[in-house]
Image (tube, helix red, strand yellow):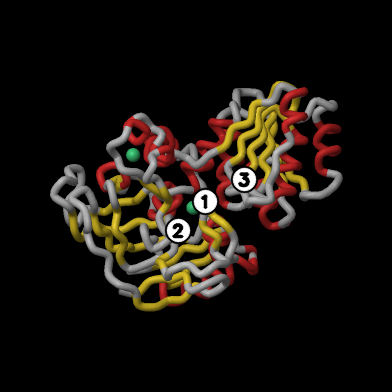
Amino acid sequence: MKALVFNGPRDIRYESYKDPELGSDNAAILKVTKCSICGSDLHIFHGEQVMTTRYSEGVEKFCVGHEFIGEVVEIGRDVHGFKVGDKVLSSAGTGCGKCMACRTGRPLECPTARAFGLDAERNGGQAEFVNIPNADQTLLHLPEGVSDEQAVLLTDAMATAYFGARNADIKASNTVAVVGLGPIGLIAVELALLLGASRVFAIDPVASRRARAAALGAEVLPAGPETVAEIFEKTQGRGVQSVIEASGAKAAIETALKLVAGGGTLSIIGVPQPDVGLQVMPIFYRNLTVRSGNAPVPFLWREVIPLVQQGRLKAADLFTHTLPLSQGADAYRIFDSRQDDVVKVMIEVG
Ligand SMILES: [Zn+2]
Ligand SMILES: [Zn+2]
């Protein structure tokens, strides 16, 4: 098959890769139809670290990508919820499906849990075909009333944004800040308003992304040395009750922590790099709650999908670019350079 294959830092190529095999009775093989590139894929692209793997060091070739939808073409005999020909979306990651963590809504605490497309042990779906372990828990039939674009966003971005908003303790009439306005941050802005926030401050260095947040109804600010002071001025010195950090960058996390009002909550959903530290003293003296973690995607679908089907959560127009799989290397370059006001790139596979 053809796939986008990690050959080294800044070297993701469209090339041939061995076809996936079923390998287990609870697995399925998917023919991918559409997939997208995530901000966290850029950490791999840059040769940075994700989980325990440093991509600057010699890593065996693997297919990248954890956001994909497609059609079931092969199915293990222990998979009961799906059949060949079903059109599905996949969770960005999965566990074994059997352990206590998997069965109680914490699949990412499973000892075998991991995202797709991090290494050759679990190849990703920026490819013509992908193996889906634990298929009954990892896949979902394409829901009615959900566009392909929204389905691709449900594999990760929408669920992660929802997890971030829920973790931020947003209540009606709260003030909220979202730091980092990539696709997940923009969806978080939409969700914060949907959950009844009275004011949403949205912060990003990129003007076109701020304009998108402003169109959703946020008060926007550039990321800079003045940002924290400005928001304290706008909130009569109190700060913000619920802050969602959606970038993972060191400076953004530091800004986010400074913005939280006493007794408030910081929710970190950006994938952090190893150099990110978090100061405990302000958390202690200002009685802050800090939550972070990977979203348990399949367990959030039942809450997020109705919002999409009812038209309350739109996540509209986030895909600014569409390219075929054969131009995947260009797709990475465009997404990485942030050229042409790119927000998210859709890759058409077949
Ligand atoms: Zn993702
Ligand atoms: Zn498990």
Q: Residues within 10 Å of mark 3 (few under 14, many from 20)?
A: many
Task: Residue under label 2, please give it.
Answer: 118
The residue at 29%/58% (across/down) is 131
The residue at 57%/60% (across/down) is 43
Q: Are marks 1 and 3 in contact (CB under 8 Å)?
A: no
- Quadrant of residue 3 within the rendered picture: bottom left
First in sequence: mark 1 vs mark 3? 1
Which SS class for mark 3?
A: loop
Labelled disc at residue 246? 3
Which SS class for mark 1?
A: loop
Task: Residue under label 1, please give it.
Answer: 51
Label 2 to label 1, Cα distance in Å?
A: 9 Å
28 or 23: nearer the eye?
23
Q: Are marks 2 and 1 in contact (CB under 8 Å)?
A: yes
- Quadrant of residue 22 within the rendered picture: bottom left
Please name the amino acid that badge 1 sits on: Met
Q: Position of residue 90 (x, y in %)?
A: 35, 50
In this picture, residue 109 sits left or right of residue 203? left
Please name the amino acid that badge 2 sits on: Leu
185 or 270: nearer the eye?
270
Label 1 to label 3, Cα distance in Å?
A: 17 Å
